Amino acid sequence: RIVYVNGEWMPEADAKISVFDRGFQFADSIYEITAVLGGKLIDYHGHAQRLSRSLTALGIPVPVSEEHMLALHRQAIARNGVEEGLVYLQVSRGVQDRDFMFGADLSPTFVIFTQSKKVLDNPKWKTGISVITMPDGRWVNRQIKTVQLLYSSLAKMEAAKAGADDAIFIEDGFITEASSSNVHIVTREGTLITRQLSNALLHGITRGSILDLARQAGVPVEERRFTLDEARNAAEIFITSATAFVMPVVRLDGEPVGEGVPGPVSGRFLQLYIQDRIATAI
Ligand code: PLP
């Protein structure tokens, strides 16, 4: 692969980051992932805006202009011939001799790479996934997309050990989100419930798009916290993320969700999302 490091494109084997990079030593770093379909970026503007918000929240300078950022995404796709997959981007505060305190004048480390992989026709869309629940042990500023992914990584390992596909996190009896996606439920009356935005969860771009599509389709929407019990009694549960789109959850802690098969509402949202986002890809 051809990757981008601080203004230059190079073969991945030639890419080097300092051992003193604060992203490596302190997870002082943010990232974004944007899906690619037909060589085009899905929901790009949402991801670009969240990237700026994450950087601003940590006081890391935005490394390039808006236009240049889009151009770099397109170059990454073109240089690697990506038809379907993702663009990964990471910005860390920069390089400095190890110290908890950081200087004001560091220049950010900026990396982009791509992954070519199947995004459409995900076989799990047909079967749904199983999830287990566990306490949310992450830090409390989850609206910032930092690379502090260790808890989520361990949670996914734990889920796999338990024979499940993923983990969803519980805090004070309420679902926050899943290890790398947002969680939504559909009540037996057909209302879509998703947790309101706060620092308890990442403000998922796919989440926002699904809410827009739901409102356009006249589906009743409630943005509020919901409990694990509400999820257990829901007709449907689904998760959303940039690369899984809309993924039905059919087992929760070993128990079937609704009929125990992917439900019609999540199926409809998946179709709507794919149609709408392919049409608006850039
Ligand atoms: N929540 C967490 C913790 C995530 O890591 C992600 C995506 O990586 C999401 C939610 C979904 O966000 P998006 O739809 O922007 O990919």
Image (cartoon, grey):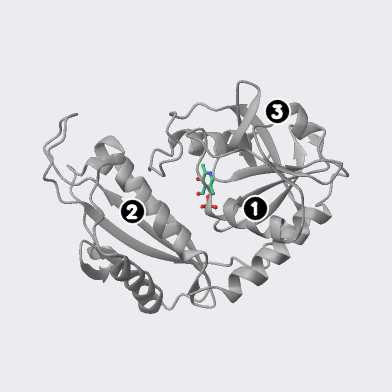
Q: Which residue is mark 1?
A: 211
Q: What x and y, as percent, mark residue 42?
A: 52, 67
Where residue 3 sits, quadrant-wise, is bottom left
Q: Earlier in the sequence, mark 1 or mark 2?
A: 2
Residue nearer the viewer, 255 or 218 = 218
The residue carrying pointer 1 sits among few (fewer than 14), some (14 to 19) or many (20 or more) residues within 10 Å by Cα, namely: many
How far separated are the C-alphas under marks 1 and 2?
A: 27 Å
* Amino acid under disc 3: Thr
Q: Which mark is drawn over residue 261?
A: none
Residues at circles 1 and 2 in contact by the CB criterion of under 8 Å: no
Badge nearest the viewer, 2 or 3: 3
Mark 2: secondary structure? strand
Find residue 217 and report its horizontal and vertical position in percent. Answer: 75, 61
Tell me if I can see residue 264 in this picture: yes
Q: Which residue is mark 2?
A: 90
Query: Height in image: 143 above or below 61?
Result: above
Query: Does 224 appear above or below 82?
Result: above
Q: Nearer the viewer, residue 159 or 241?
A: 241
Closer to viewer: mark 1 or mark 3: 1
Mark 1 element type: helix
Q: Is residue 34 left or right of residue 96?
A: right
Instruction: Tell me which residue sits at (54%, 39%) in the image.
Output: 197
Identify the residue at image location x=19%, y=47%: 94
Q: Quadrant of the N terminus?
A: bottom left
185 vs 77, left or right, is right
Left or right, residue 274 beside residue 147:
right
Q: Which mark is residue 227?
A: 3
Distance between the alpha carbons at the discs numbered 2 and 3: 33 Å
Would you call the spot at circle 2 few (<14 residues within 10 Å), some (14-19), or many (20 or more)? Answer: many
Image location of residue 91, percent across then percent down: 29, 52
Toward the right, the furthest residue is 259
Q: Disc 1 to disc 3, how far (Cα)?
A: 20 Å
